[in-house]
Image (spheres, rainbow, N blue to C red):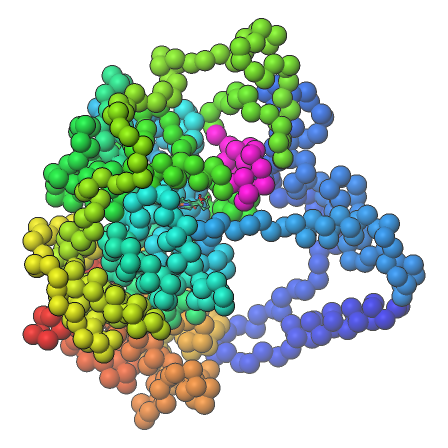
Amino acid sequence: PGPLKKIADKVVDVVQNAASAERPEVPGAPGAAPPSVAEPVDPTGPLPPKPDQAAPRPVTATGRDTGAGATARSQDGQFLTNAQGARLPDGDHSLKAGPRGPVLLQDHHLREKITHFDHERIPERVVHARGAAAHGVFRGYGTAAAVCKAAFLAEDVETPVFVRFSTVLGSRGSADTVRDTRGFATKFYTSEGVFDLVGNNIPVFFIQDAIKFPDVVHAAKPHPDREIPQAQSAHDTFWDFVTLHTEATHHTLWNMSDRGIPRSFRTMEGFGIHTFRLVNADGASTLVKWHWKPKLGVHSMVWEEAQLVAGADPDFHRRDLADAIEAGAFPQWELGIQTFPDTPEQTFEGIDLLDPTKIVPEELAPVRPVGLLTLNANPTNFFAETEQVAFHPGHLVPGIDITDDPLLSGRLFSYLDTQITRLGGPNFAQIPINRTHAPVNDMLRDGFHQHAVHSGVAPYKPNSLDGGCPFFAGAAERAFIEYPTPVAAAAKVREAPASFADHFSQPRLFWASMSPVEREHIIAAYTFELGKCYEQAVKERGLQVLARIDADLCAQVAAGLGLPAPEPTEPPAQVRPSPALSQLGRTWPVDGRVVGLVAGTDHGSLATVRRAVLSAGLVPLVIAGAGGELRTAGDGEPLAVQRTFDTARSVEFDAVVLVGAPGPARGANPARDAKAGAPKPDASGIDPRLVLMLTEAYRHSKPLVAVAGGQSALQAAGIPTNAPGVLAGLGPDEAMGPLIELLAGHRVWHRFPPSSEVGG
Ligand code: HDE
């Protein structure tokens, strides 16, 4: 055998020895067989093909059958082949002149494999590069019928959807929990064509005119010299721009609020932002704003938590979405509409409906539910689906039309344009995830990556050679007919309407609508972000902007920055708060919330609590000092340890339940753990990593429950057992009711009254 073979054998030996080596003893863990490292040798058939793995059908409606199977070119047959279907005898060695000789240029298999690999990456999205997606279904309630004729909104019509959530600023590999706006883009595969609702989790935007988009994105992206910071707005160029360009104030304020750090994609609202137009069966027009309302309520992280997660689990939101769907806890949102009469002014209660930096408070125009979105399947392949999906606000169906919002107009150009670079040509609508479920009979031809085999000789109209086909549809055949919006005679100008100059009334409204806890978070966020700027002038200008929102907000941020607070330049806010803007103060279903169950010595109680957590629709995760299984008394099933103090931080859990008196620290290494931030073990002997977990969860206002003697860990962590949201001394059957009540309010915010409530 040649030297390479010897090295390969050695590697196999090392791997096999490692697998069978004695493992450190885990009390209670059965002697698990070492995992097999051998590759299966018998060819087996491929897994059953999934619909989205199928290649584009070689037979199109108009093309000639080439004889190839429907799944050819993806995953078919038992053997490894090249791209042309020829079977290959070896995938590990290049063709060489002897085992030690030079690699031959004639190795077409090597060249094909490496060339394909060299071209595996496509440009990431210029914004919203980092994303995660899921398949689902939308069911119309029929409640929009009076204002909208779109078929997918009719009662009980079910429409397949694909939804992609994203952050705006970061690159594809950036962390999920950064402070940023989130994209919430939905593709409805309706019977009348694709409808894309390409929205965000914040209902207003930084700019009022698309021509400013490159400016705001250049300012917010990393600095062009060193390309830092990644996925952050806490830097000079961002704050330079948004403080000079004060129409960004409203969106920036939302970003600095808890909306900028969602707990989960599942707990975000979504907004179409712009005012769109609905058209009903009689051809009448109504203006509309779209809303997605999460069944689980709007819930965010606290800032320290978001920062910890960005390091401990940068894929936190992506994982949360996929895990929830895999576990059957399907996330749901109601689609809602706020409707407004289509008057010539296009204003409602004095609010300019064409200004995308303005909301219409729900108290003035209620959000009426028109359908239910359920995400029920994870993508099969990230690249094929999540990466290649192409959204476009111009993908509209009969019954839904646009308005003259100047931001929307620019988007209608941009999204088609960007796909041509990103997806390599104009035929991206033929990529499986982008294909409409309605019949297509266009006259678009050729271009890169053309998959259709068009027949006929006359891809033009009028024609007689193809019998005049295809024909135009009229309203009776449900054609998409632009609403005949009147356009006032006017001179060409580069100007905005006068009402667009109001940049502060709505930031004041938002601030006035926040609860004390939410205000405290906003103050901390501005202090952090402006504090990260180096330029004194930028910080000072930031304070001048805040002074125009609220004097107290400005004074508190100024104190944090160590700068004088500028005098307010305008009289104090005269606004009517909108309670609907606050995300606190209500209760929501607890489905799918994650409860960490810390195993003490009483495994019987642990099994009881775990069962109760599961049957309440929550997700239990059993945590112990070391991995393995925990034996319960009698014949009970052993409990698998799902997280250890090394693999989990408190941030993964919505609540922590201590079950049974904690045993002595297992798997702890005081010297190492102290370096990782855990306190030193004290006389109690309780694992310091558990103490760290409890203090974090306490600080982040999460419910803490101690059953069957678990309170000694709370005491070791210095947590008062009578503090709000801390329940101690309960039996294993008593804990669930109070825990669910606490979780329904999302967090125990009253544990730490904000300074404004205690006279600070
Ligand atoms: Fe986008 N935006 N955008 N945007 N946007 C893109 O399209 C653009 C805006 C939004 O998951 C790009 O396919 C302009 C508002 C989402 O694939 C690009 C303007 C809102 C996504 C683009 C805006 C959004 C994008 C980049 C100002 C909320 C991700 C890649 C006129 C209503 C969609 C792509 C996905 C993506 C342009 C403003 C939401 C370059 C020019 C306002 C959710 O076309």
Answer whether residue 425 is magenta in the image.
yes
> Picture quarter containing residue 314?
bottom left
Q: In the depicted view, which residue is nearer to us: 576 or 727?
A: 576
Instruction: Tell me where residue 681 appears, x and y as whole percent.
Output: 36, 89
Residue at screen point 56% across, 34% down = 426
Residue at screen point 30% across, 22% down = 483
Q: In the depicted view, which residue is nearer to us: 21 or 490?
A: 490
> Picture quarter containing residue 69?
top right
Instruction: Tell me where residue 480 appears, x and y as whole percent.
Output: 38, 21
Q: Is residue 167 visible?
A: yes
* Lateral position of residue 594 relative to residue 502, left or right: right
Image height check: is 199 above or below 730? above
Which stretch appears magenta? 419-436
Image height check: is 719 above or below 467? below
Residue at screen point 20% across, 73% down = 558
Q: How many marks?
A: 0
Quarter of the rendering occupied by the N terminus: bottom right
Quarter of the rendering occupied by the C terminus: bottom left
* Lateral position of residue 28 relative to residue 372, left or right: right
Answer whether residue 532 is magenta in the image.
no
